[in-house]
Amino acid sequence: MGEPVKLNEDRPGAHVRVTGVAKSYGDNVVLSDVNLEVAAGSVTAMIGPSGAGKSTLLRCMNLLERPDSGTIQIGHHAIDVAKGVEPANLAELRRSAGMVFQSFNLFPHMTVRRNISLPQQRVLGRSRAEADHVSKRLLERMGLGNKGDEYPNKCSGGQQQRIAIARALALEPEVMLFDEPTSALDPELGAEVLDVMRELAAGGMTMVVVTHEMRFAANVSDQLVVMADGKIIESGDPRRIMADPEHPRTRRFLQAVLER
Ligand code: ADP
C-alpha cells in the first residue's frame, strides 16, 4: 500500500462564506442576495417552509447548482460566479464539500464497499487497496463494519444513509452539506443517522443541514437559519429563535412544525 491515507477525522472542518448569492429559474426568483457565514467546525441548521430555497442554497454551496451571481467560499477555495468558473477551481470546491441527499443515491449494482471506494479511486486517484482500507474504517465508524460485501438493497434506509455519509467522508471534505437526510426515514432509523451526524459535529466537522428535525436543530446546531421566499429572514442562536422568533413567518413555521 502507498502513503497512509489520512481520514478527515484528523482535520477540522473549514469556514464557509456565502456572499450575495442570487438564483432565478426564468421569472421565479429562488434566492435573492443570500449571505451566510458558517464558522469552521460549527453546525448550521436551515429550516423554513417548502419552496423557500433551502435546497437550492445548499446546492449552490457546492456549485451543483450555479448561482446567477455571488461568491462561495469554502476554506481556501473561493469562486466568484461573476468572474467565471474555472473547471479546476470548480473541481476543488466540489471536492471540499461533501453532500448527502434525502434519497441516498447509492449504486444498487455495487457492494457497499465499492460504493464508497469507487469515488475515492476516481476523484482522489487512490488505489483500490487504499480506497478499500478507508472504506473499511469508515464503515466501522458508522457501526456498519459487517456490511462491506452486502448490496445496498439488503440494508435498511438508516444504514443506506450512513453508507452515503461514509461515501462523502471518504473524499475528505472540509464541510458536509445535508439535504433533509432523515426525511425519507421513519423516526427510529432517522435517529441512527442523527447519532452519526452528532458524532461528526462533535469531531469538528463543519456542517450545514437542511432539516425538519427541530430537536437536532435545538440540541446540535450552533446557528439556526430560517429561510422564506428565497431569503434568510432570521438567523442566530437556535434556542433563542425557537423560544422567541422575531419574524412572524418564523413564528408561523415553528408553530406548524411543532404541531405536527
Ligand atoms: P426548499 O428546499 O426550501 O423546499 P427549493 O430550493 O427546493 O426549496 O425550491 C425553491 C424554488 O425553486 C421552488 O419554487 C422550486 O419550484 C424552484 N426550483 C428548484 N429547483 C428548480 C429547477 N431545477 N428548475 C426550476 N425551478 C426549480
Image: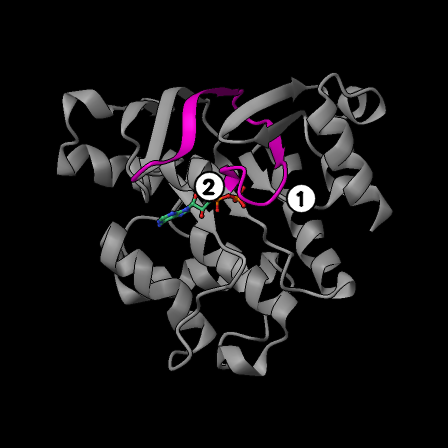
Residue 142 sits above or below residue 21 on the image: below
Instruction: Answer with left or right where residue 74 lies relative to residue 163.
Output: left
Q: Badge 1 is on which residue?
A: 199
- Whole-percent x and y of residue 148? 50, 74
Q: Nearer the viewer, residue 1 or 162?
A: 162
Please say whether residue 81 is one of the residues in the magenta stretch: no
Left or right: 205 in relation to 219: left
**Which residue range is magenta in the image?**
26-54
The answer to which image quadrant residue 70 occupies is: top left
Where residue 74 sits: x, y (%)?
A: 38, 27
**Residue 214 seen in this snapshot:** yes
Does residue 36 appear left or right of residue 89 in this picture?
right
Mark 1: few/some/many CA within 10 Å (<14, 14-19, 20+): some
Instruction: Please name the residue that numbered disc 2 is placed on.
Output: 8
Q: Is residue 144 visible?
A: no
Q: How many marks?
A: 2
Residue shown at the point (60%, 21%) measured from the top left? 233
Q: Which mark is residue 139?
A: none
Q: Which tag, 1 or 2, sits closer to the chain's start?
A: 2
Q: Residue at x 52, y 63 (%)?
A: 163
Q: Amino acid at mark 1?
A: Glu
Query: How far is mark 1 from mark 2, CA to CA?
Result: 13 Å
Which one is closest to the eye, mark 1 or mark 2? 1
User: Ligand 1 falls in which quarter?
Assistant: top left
Name the amino acid type tagged 2: Asn
122 shown above or below 59: below
